[in-house]
Image (tube, rainbow, N blue to C red):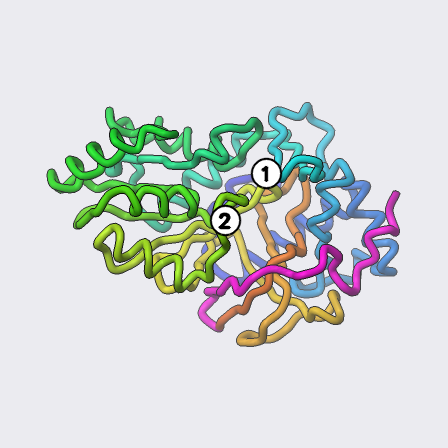
Amino acid sequence: MNRNRIFNISNPIEFENTALEIFQFQAKNNTIYASFITHLKQNPTKIDAFHKIPFLPIQFFKSHRIIASKDTVQEVFLSSGTTGMKQSKHFVTDVSLYKESFQKGFQHFYGNIEDYTILALLPSYFERNGSSLIYMVNDLIHQSKKPTSGFYLNNLDELFKNLTELDKKGEKTLLIGVSFALLDLVEKYKFNLKNTIVMETGGMKGRRKELIREELHQILCEGFGISNIHSEYGMTELLSQAYSKGNGLFSCPPWMKILTRDTEDALTILPNGKSGGINVIDLANINSCSFIATQDLGKTYQDGTFEVLGRFDNSDIRGCNLMLLK
């Protein structure tokens, strides 16, 4: 598979053809995924549309080595988790695929990274090893080539000073932060930002009570003095990200697509506008698995956007027996 095909997809036909080709490759070369397909009694050669492709439950990344390449593993990304909780592991054999995906994804939605100063407030991620988010943001910081770009841990005073000064100068600035840390910041300081994008990556990580998105964004909008909070939708098991520019609707780069499945029958794909489990097609995941059934609940729309509504209450996804593979 020529990687240029993945990152130069320009229409639905190209997406479908590339997705089907990657599926055939992974059905042959990813032993865990192949076993999963066999247990579902699916014949890969009979699958002729991307919505018919079986989606691997994301929990398999916690219990199995999900890999479709014989190349040496270059990076192992680990999910965050509380003590004693099993972490997902994403074995990445070609980290340049990840770099190309997030760099081109950022450019697709926001333009040239060198136009921005990147300020990162990601304490819960920064304090552990193996975070794919830290890897991405660190690279974007370096790509920005701005002297003030960087990570901020507990130095909120310095962050406030730099953020305020950059905004007053009219510098295009992106503040990307985990939700609880952004709330800590606006509780300590009052902002009135004009030239800054504030992007939350979700999650309170056990530091605060979970809030619904509307409530969280309202508090942050008031605290930063802005009208919209942007959001990033990504996860350890993916090499691509979707972004929302403030209306709660996420958009994918051309090589990524969201479908929703019936919560009672995991093999049934729902039409647009119906709430269900979120399935992700991430074609950048060519060397692991590009077809993943997440534990998020959401809704898709005709224009390709989607909404994240929450998560499954139970850890098992109905319709997929996770005990089949040992």
Query: How many residues crowd mark 2 within 10 Å: few (<14), some (14–19), many (20+)?
Result: some
Residue drawn at the location 39% of the way across and 41% of the way down? 181
> Is 25 left, or right, of 208 in this rendering?
right
Residue 317 shown in magenta: yes
Can residue 5 be seen at all in this image of the molecule? no
Residue 252 shown in magenta: no
| Residue placed under numbered mark 1 in the picture | 80
Residue drawn at the location 67% of the way across and 64% of the way down? 49
Residue drawn at the location 86% of the way across and 54% of the way down? 38
286 or 221: nearer the viewer: 221
Precedes in sequence: disc 2 or disc 1? 1
Residue 111, image x, y percentages: 30, 45
What's drawn in magenta, residue-wise? 302-326
Q: Is 309 rendered above or below residue 323?
A: below
Tag 2 and tag 1, C-beta contact below 8 Å: yes
Residue 71, by quadrant, is top right
